[in-house]
Image (cartoon, rainbow, N blue to C red):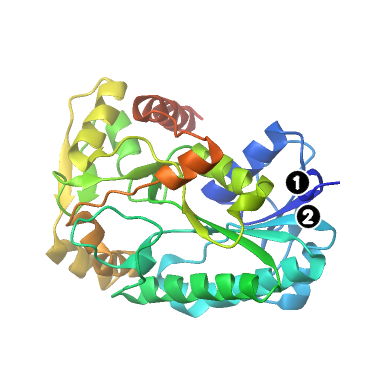
Amino acid sequence: MSDFEGLHVVFGAGAIGLAVVDELTARGSRVRVVNRAGTAAVPAGVQVVTGDATDPASAKAVCNGASVVYNCANPPYHKWPEMFPAIQAGILEGAAAAGARLVAMDNLYMYGPTEGKPLTEDLPYRATTRKGATRARMAEDLLSAHRSGKVRVTIGRASDYFGPRGVQSAAGERVFKAAIAGKRAQVVGNPDILHTYTYVPDIGKALVTLAERDEALGRAWHLPNPETVTTRQFVELIFKETGHPARLQVAPRLLLRAMGVFVPAAREVLEMLYEFEEPFVVDSSAFRRTFGVEATPLAEAIRVTVAWYRGQAAS
């Protein structure tokens, strides 16, 4: 039996974790979801268990019998440096104990500012932020574990995401929910520069693709993205789908700084604002060439996402 035919253990039941579950269940795979609560809105037949990824013993227990482990866990945004490395370390121990391959969900913070150059996987890690330095260290730890033979690792990196369940993203409910209501979409940075956004279901499909392909192992991959447009164009496409005139509001730095006094997540946005103040174009051509997987066209992805938000409003 191949790795892919065995049990798939997914840490995290947020938008990305559940997108992985959707893709796996569509393929008929056996799936176990792990989070602290032990509950999640999953399809029939998916097992949900309580687990503490920061405790290696707990992680090993919930990974027992796994062929593939997915790290889609995501601690509170303002606590990444304190919590994320321990979460990853526990999941790595769980995957290693099970002899499973480990698929790690990642982002693009480790590269730091690129002065508008396209982001490719061979860029050096030059993070200038706390969260970027954390991500760089975590990626290095994963690849070191792979090189040592401790666990087989592959890493998938996505840009700011949007899609069903992706409410907390920069392109989440502050944009889609507002557009459906005909209110101003709230964005940060310069809306008239190019910015790549990644569609949540594409992330789920791509992570599962990494799990099933041996050539994915031992490196990081930029997951497929739809065509890159400016944030303003992105918002205009959303409003076009809703039938409302496009309305956009840019949150100034001073407002974010003031909000950060009371809202930790707003304070954390400031250090990553460079991503929205210079062109942020993600090159995912290596993934497409290697695995033959294309992203969902942007208009279609927006159509499905608007329908999901409308369904949430109706319910």
Judge by depth and name the residue closer to the eye, 56 or 44.
56
Name the image quarter holding residue 20: top right
Q: Residue 259: x, y in percent? A: 24, 66
Q: Residues within 10 Å of mark 2 (few under 14, many from 20)?
A: many
Q: Is residue 105 above or below residue 286?
A: below
Which residue is identified by label 2?
67
Q: Residues within 10 Å of mark 1 (few under 14, many from 20)?
A: many
Q: Residue 5: x, y in percent? A: 80, 43
CB of mark 1 within 8 Å of CB of mark 2?
A: yes
Identify the residue at image location x=32%, y=35%.
227
Residue 208 showing in the rendered view: yes
Judge by depth and name the residue closer to the eye, 182 or 52.
52
Quick one: SS at disc 2? strand
Residue 165 showing in the rendered view: no
Judge by depth and name the residue closer to the eye, 55 or 224.
224
Name the image quarter holding residue 10: bottom right
| Cα distance between the residues tagged 1 and 2 | 7 Å
Amino acid type, callout 2: Ser
Residue furthest to the top: 243
On screen, residue 124 versus residue 144, left or right, reads left
Q: Residue 141: x, y in percent? A: 55, 76
Which residue is identified by label 1?
4
Q: Residue 120: x, y in percent? A: 36, 55
Name the image quarter holding residue 55: bottom right
